[in-house]
Each structure stands twice: as structure tokens, then as C-alpha cells.
Amino acid sequence: MRFLLLLFISYYYLNANAHIFVYHRFGDDKHSSTNTTLKELDKEFKYFKDNGYKVVKLSQIVERIKSKKEVPDNWVALTIDDSYKSFYKNGLPIFIKYNYPFSLYVYVKATQKKYGDFMSWEEIKEASKYGEIGLHSYSHPHLTNISLEKVKIDTKKSFEIFEKKLGFKPKSYAYPYGEYNQKVQKIIKSFNFDYILNQNTGTVTKSSDIYDINRIALVGKVNLQEKLKYKTLNVQWIEPKTYPKDNILKKVKAKIDPNIKELKLYITGYGWQNIKVKNGIIDKKLDLQLKKSRTRVILSTDYFTIANKIIIQDKK
């Protein structure tokens, strides 16, 4: 019995989990929903420093995944979406103060058209001395709402302008709004990015898909200790793969470790429910009318050890 308990614990907790966080604005009170105050940012960075966390380049984590090496539990990577000017003016000095690397994802049209709230190409070049720079589309569209041809055109345009202005090709891509489906992912992968980022709550392990990397949002006042509790539950999803055409989620089906006998299932709009696992197979009939065009399906053992899948309605 003791051996089985140790085996059960090792399955969940000995598979190391790194955390990747995403920020947007810094010290910008006009946009509180996507803002991190400078006091909060400094508090979070001090927590990393004082509690044994190592802030590393995102590319270091990706190299670990590629080589199938454990990603240390205490590794953290920090990303910033949209290249708002508030990062350059307010956030960057704090990153430099702590000597923390970052990955900045550029909303190309906003910089190219010189929108006032966004960084200039010169500021992005300056920021590149301290962190990695990636691509965040040209026009920041909801990629699942436009044709695949338009996805291709948007990505090609952003890629070419990025390379011309910065002098190097972007190695990574972050989906606008974190939204994608299998067809969109195939188009983005065709541009030969080294890795692609989503915005799904979850962690990164040596088994993670480098073209579907989880990131946890850090905006507003957050409980950082709670965010750092998240771990990856190893699940092989069978259903759903895509958003159902009739808006009815008929079932959730997946493979999981056969030692697990019960799990918690979350569906956006319906909350949590307990479900049984039989011989490593989850096969839960639901027939639920989905309430949101962006629906999150989560399997969890304890609310923190999770497998997270987002399905998005194709509105084209």
C-alpha cells in the first residue's frame, strides 16, 4: 500500500513543472484589466528572488523540452504581449533592476503605424538588448474568426516587416488573444517558428508540445503563490478536439494514468463536477449546450494539477 502511495505521488509531483507567465501593461491605470502596477511587479519579482525561483529565457525552457530533459520546478519565464509603450517606460527598468530576461511579442501594425500607446521600432531594438523578441501577428485579429488565407497573409506580412525592421527573423509566435484551433495552428507552424505560445492556464514539462506552450496570465493583483502551485496532469485528449458545430458538447473522452479513479471536470458556464475514471479512460457523456464561443475544458485532481483544453467556435 505504501509503495502504491509513493507511486501515485511520484506520478504527479516528480515530473518537474516550469511556469511561464504573460504580462501586458505596466503602471497604466487607464487599462486596469490588463495592467500590472509597478508595486505589484516589484513584489512578484522579489518573491521569485527570495523563494529560490530562477527566471530564465523562454528559449532555455524550449531547449529542455526539445532534448526531453526535465525542466526544473523552480524555473520561471516571463513574457509580454502587444509591446505596449508602458513596458518600455515603466516595466523594463524593473526587469533590468532584477536582471530578469523576458520575451516580448510585437503587435506589428501598432508599431508600424506608430500608434501612440505602443513601442517604436527603436524602442523594441533597445529592449532586445535585455530579452528575446517574438511575433504577435500584424493586425492582432481573432485568428479563428478570419479565413485561413487571411491568417496566412497576416502572418506573412508581420514576419516580413519584423525581419526588415529588426534585422532578424522571429523565432517564436504568440497567438493574439491566445485563440487558435487546429487549422490555425497548422498555418502558423508553416512559418517554421521554433515554438508557439498559447494563453492556457498550465505549466510546462519535458513532455510539453513546443507548438502549444502554456502561459499563465499575471494581470492586476494576483495571488502569485497560488499561480505557482499549478502542475501538469498528463492527459491524452480524444474528445473534444474542436468546437462542436451544433454547439452541443456531447462528451469528454481522454486517456489518463490507470491508477487514477476519480477526477474533477470543469466546463465553462457549468462549473466543476466529479467524474469516474475506468481503467485509465475518461468517457463522460454530457450533451451540454455551450454558453460561450470560447469554452475551457479542464481535468484536475485537486484544482491545481490540471489538463486544460480551450475550444473556440469558428465564426467564419
Image: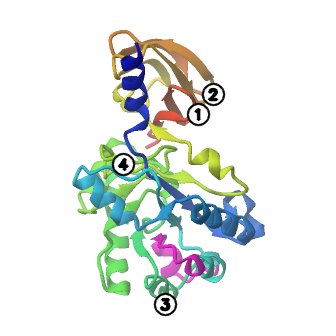
Residue 49: image tag: none
N-terminal label among 2 and 1? 2
Within-10-Å neighbours for mark 2: few <14, some 14–19, many 20+: few
**Residue bearing the label numbered 2:** 269
Can you say which quadrant of the picture contains the C terminus? Answer: top left
Q: Residue 302: x, y in percent?
A: 56, 27
Mark 1 neighbour density, 10 Å: few (under 14) some (14–19) many (20 or more): few
Labels 1 and 3 touching (C-beta < 8 A): no
Measuring 67% from the left and 70% from the top, which residue is drawn there? Answer: 26
Relative to the observer, which residue lies in front, 249 or 113?
249
Cα gap from disc 2 to disc 1, whole angstroms: 7 Å
- Quarter-of-image position of residue 67: bottom left
Identify the amino acid type marked 3. Glu
Give how far apart the Cα atoms at labels 2 and 3 are: 44 Å
Q: Secondary structure at mark 3?
A: helix
Circles 2, 1 touching at the beta carbon (< 8 Å): yes
Q: In the rendering, which numbered label is found on residue 212?
A: 4
User: Cα distance, mark 4 to mark 3?
Assistant: 30 Å
Reply yes or no: does residue 248 show up in magenta.
no
Q: Which one is closest to the eye, mark 4 or mark 3?
A: 4
221 is higher (above) or lower (below) than 38: above
Work out how far the residue at label 4 is from the one at label 1, CA to CA, in angstroms.
22 Å
Secondary-structure class at tag 1: loop
Q: Amino acid at mark 4?
A: Asp
Report the Cα–Cα distance between label 1 and label 3: 40 Å
Q: Which residues are magenta?
A: 95-117
Provide residue 80's location: percent of width, then percent of height.
53, 66
Residue drawn 36% across the image and 79% down it: 161
Q: Nearer the viewer, residue 91 or 8?
A: 8
Which residue position is annotated with label 1?
Answer: 292
Q: Which residue is mark 3?
A: 122
Q: Amino acid at mark 2?
A: Gly
